[in-house]
Amino acid sequence: MLSCNRVISKDCHVCSQHRLTQRETEVLRLMAKEYCVTAISNILRKSIKTVSSQKKSAMNKLRISNNRDLYAFLRKNSELLRYG
């Protein structure tokens, strides 16, 4: 298993130090498909604020500080974010 290099593992979503919740992972999967937070909130039937908080929480766990770096991360790891 990979540790602390911000590469997602199929088994644990992220290394144990940065483990994402199922909902955080789902938000990132949808973002990788180029859905915006508003669209994701409609798909998941959650408020925009909830989805935004889940996005921010995932970014904090992954030590990503801005959207540009988040989208670069998602492009690099998109194949591991797909449903198995």
Image (spheres, rainbow, N blue to C red):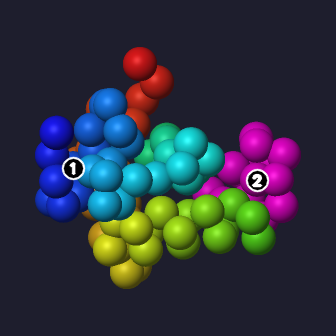
Q: With respect to residue 9, does 75 lie above or below?
A: below
Q: Would you say 76 lies left or right of 35 here? A: left
**Amino acid bearing label 1:** Val
Looking at the image, do the residues carrying marks 2 and 1 touch, with CB atoms under 8 Å apart? no
Kindly identify the residue that appears in the image at 46 percent across and 24 percent down.
83
Q: With respect to residue 53, does 27 lie above or below?
A: above
Kindly identify the residue that appears in the image at 66 percent across and 68 percent down.
52
On residue 7, which mark appears?
Answer: 1
Q: Is residue 38 magenta?
A: yes
Q: Position of residue 18 (x, y in %)?
A: 35, 60
Q: Which residues are magenta?
A: 36-48
Instruction: Locate the N terminus and report the quarter of the image it occupies.
Output: top left
Asked whether 67 or 65 is in front, the reply is 65
Magenta region, mostly helix, strand or loop?
helix
Q: Secondary structure at mark 1?
A: loop
Q: Position of residue 41 (x, y in %)?
A: 76, 53
Kindly identify the residue that appears in the image at 44 percent across and 46 percent down.
32
On residue 41, which mark appears?
Answer: 2
Instruction: Locate the C terminus and report the quarter of the image it occupies.
Output: top left
**Sequence-wise first label, 2 or 1:** 1
Q: Is residue 60 magenta?
A: no
Q: Residues within 10 Å of mark 2 (few under 14, many from 20)?
A: some
Where residue 10 sits, quadrant-wise, is top left
**Amino acid bearing label 2:** Ser
Q: Secondary structure at mark 2?
A: helix
